[in-house]
Image (cartoon, rainbow, N blue to C red):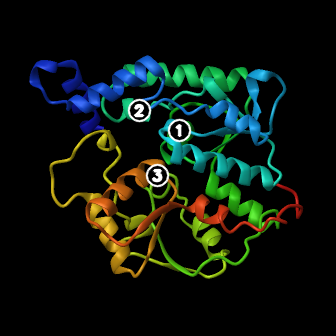
Amino acid sequence: QRILDLREMLLDRPELKGVPTQIRDANLALFRRGRPHAASAPAGEERLRSIGVKVLADGGSADWLFFAGCTNWADEAEAQSTCDLAEMLIRGDLDLGTLGSEEICCGDPARFTGETGLFDHQRDQLRELIEHYKVRKIVTGCPHALHLLKTAYDLDGVEVRHTVEVLEELAAAGRLTFKTSPECVVAYHDPCYLGRSCGVYDAQRRLLGRVPNLKLVEMADHRDTSLCCGGGGGGVFQEIEASPRLAWTRARQAVDAGADILAVACPTCKQMLTDAATTLDLDLRVAYVSDLLSRSLDPSAGGGDEAP
């Protein structure tokens, strides 16, 4: 909390020049557009509607609100992964809805860079939407949103889950099965907010264990001793001068563990670790857990026991 108080003080005193320009730009974009990224969402509402996700503004209701998160629409690759994830949830017979063009950032970048007033604004707007549509269950692929929705939004009676938790329950119920896939060695990176903050460690590992020909290995630091990717607290928006960077160390740990794929379950980690593998010229691909599942999904998947 002391670090957050210091960041808030620095933002209030620009003459000290203690806040990187990239952080101020990200918060300005968040204030103006509802998301901190320069890129705009690539027609996310229409793409989700086309695969069967209900747009809540159209009327009606859904059992689950699919909260994509702003980073998951940051570019075309992220958008495709987001749509593939939503489609997989639907294949598991989940009744999904989306806020569509009304969805805004959860406010994590503002809160953890010291812009508490902007965070309060984002929280109040998003909470109003959740209450307006009478949402009772939320599933999100963004651990930052998961953490804030569970701890800072006062959503009484609203269940909030990460997508890996729901996907594992669908797979355990026989609603999703996975066919043979190319042989690969995968290391899984535990994100700070999904692991230490929310205690989700096992669902994603059980999911990866269901994929044929996928060998899961652990890095030197994993589960509650996992290393941060360096992207939280605004790190994803700025060039860090320190060397080696946290993401570099993490990517090298994956290679040292014998992995050719580094699996992630957080869009911020995906960006940081992809940049690290590219910068270091490592023979390592960074991929979402959901992307690895999607490419191995049995086309006849469906049915099974009652969905979550």
Q: Is residue 101 above or below residue 202?
A: above
Q: Is residue 42 above or below residue 277?
A: above
Identity, as a three-letter code, of the amino acid under mark 2: His
Q: Which comes sooner in the sequence, label 2 or label 1?
A: 2
Q: Which comes sooner in the sequence, label 3 or label 1?
A: 1
Q: CA distance from mark 3 to mark 2?
A: 24 Å
Mark 1, other Cα within 10 Å: few <14 / some 14–19 / many ≥20: many
Identity, as a three-letter code, of the amino acid under mark 1: Trp
Is residue 308 in sight in this rendering? no
> Residue 197, labelled with which disc?
3
Which structural element holds mark 3?
loop
Identity, as a three-letter code, of the amino acid under mark 3: Ser
The residue tagged 2 is 37
Q: Position of residue 135 (x, y in %)?
A: 73, 31
Callouts 3 and 2 close, C-beta under 8 Å? no
Give the side of residue 281 with respect to residue 55, left or right: left
Q: Nearer the viewer, residue 80 or 166?
A: 80
Mark 3, other Cα within 10 Å: few <14 / some 14–19 / many ≥20: some
> Residue 73, labelled with which disc?
1
Q: Is residue 143 above or below residue 41?
A: below
The image quarter containing residue 155 is top right
Depth check, mark 3 against mark 2: the one in front is: 2
The residue lying at 63 percent from left, 71 percent from top is: 206
